[in-house]
Amino acid sequence: MNNTKGNGGLTNLIHRILNPKGAKNKLTNKRFNPEHADKLMSEERKVQLPQSKIIDYLKLTPTDKVADLGAGNGYFTIPIARNTTNTVYAVDIEPKMLDMLKENTTKERLDNIDYVISDLEDIQLPDNAVNKVLVSLVIHEVTNLETSINEIKRIIKPGGELLLIEWKAIETESGPPLDERISSNGMIKFLNTAGFSAEAIDLNAVHYAIKAELNEGEMEY
């Protein structure tokens, strides 16, 4: 479903953001290991990224159609599904994670979640499929940031909203290596150039969020 068009200026900006010293982009083969899925539901995570607080940033309504990209075992997917009667697309490249989510969904008796096995560079959803998108702690894993953001633009309706959560570009005891992280300022510059209106939110000592609205008329991808 990916029909991304070339954009030399955007590509150069990404290179400057990800490789400020000319280093080789290493954002490959960093997929989360399903064997560590219990960490995604840990008490520590609930303190750092409280579900209700994060979901509040999306300002969900009962009619919102939402894509949770990198849904994992449903840490955010399930509370999102509780807050809308419309479809929630749980998108993840790892089938094992979606199987865990299905088990959790059954326990919660939710019937509005669709499970989509997909990476973020060729998202298996139609154009303009949703009006809200959540991407939590997975953008640093993608091989091609420009392609992934263009795919998000493709599936989100003009005027729709993106909430992106990532690791701060600082040394921390947990999380990805520093050279895989993207600063909040860098991410804002990139999203604004890509056709969003973005602002940063300081979540905690190690995470930030970007809330971004896709500008009307930004249909080209």
Image (tube, rainbow, N blue to C red):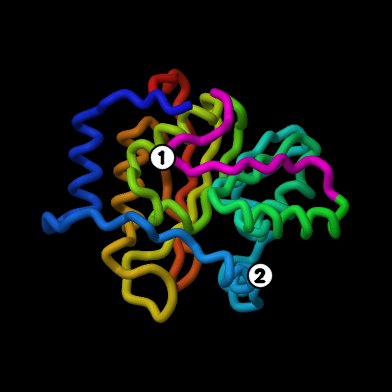
The residue positioned 48% from the left and 26% from the top of the image is 1
Crowd class of label 2 (few under 14; some 14 to 19; many from 20; radius 10 Å): few
In the image, 140 versus 169, the foreground residue is 140
SS assignment for the magenta stretch, majority? loop
Q: Which mark is residue 123?
A: none
- Is residue 49 depicted above or below 87 in this figure? below
**Percent from the top left, x then y, of residue 124?**
55, 33
Q: Which mark is residue 41?
A: 2
Pointer 2 and pointer 1: residues touching (CB < 8 Å)?
Answer: no
In the image, 33 versus 142, the foreground residue is 33
Circle 2 SS class: helix
**Percent from the top left, x then y, of residue 17?**
23, 50
Crowd class of label 1 (few under 14; some 14 to 19; many from 20; radius 10 Å): many
- The residue that mark 1 highlights is 148
Q: Is residue 159 left or right of residue 191?
A: right
Q: Quarter of the image holding residue 100?
A: bottom right
**Percent from the top left, x then y, of residue 65?**
68, 34
What's drawn in magenta, residue-wise?
110-127
Q: Is residue 50 left or right of residue 191?
A: right
The residue positioned 34% from the left and 44% from the top of the image is 145
- Is residue 53 depicted above or below 85 in this figure? below
Query: Given the image, on which type of amino acid does mark 1 rest?
Result: Ser
Q: Is residue 149 left or right of residue 129?
A: left
Query: Given the image, on which type of amino acid does mark 2 rest?
Result: Met
The residue positioned 44% from the left and 20% from the top of the image is 219
Is residue 84 one of those drawn in magenta? no
Q: Quarter of the image holding residue 66?
A: top right
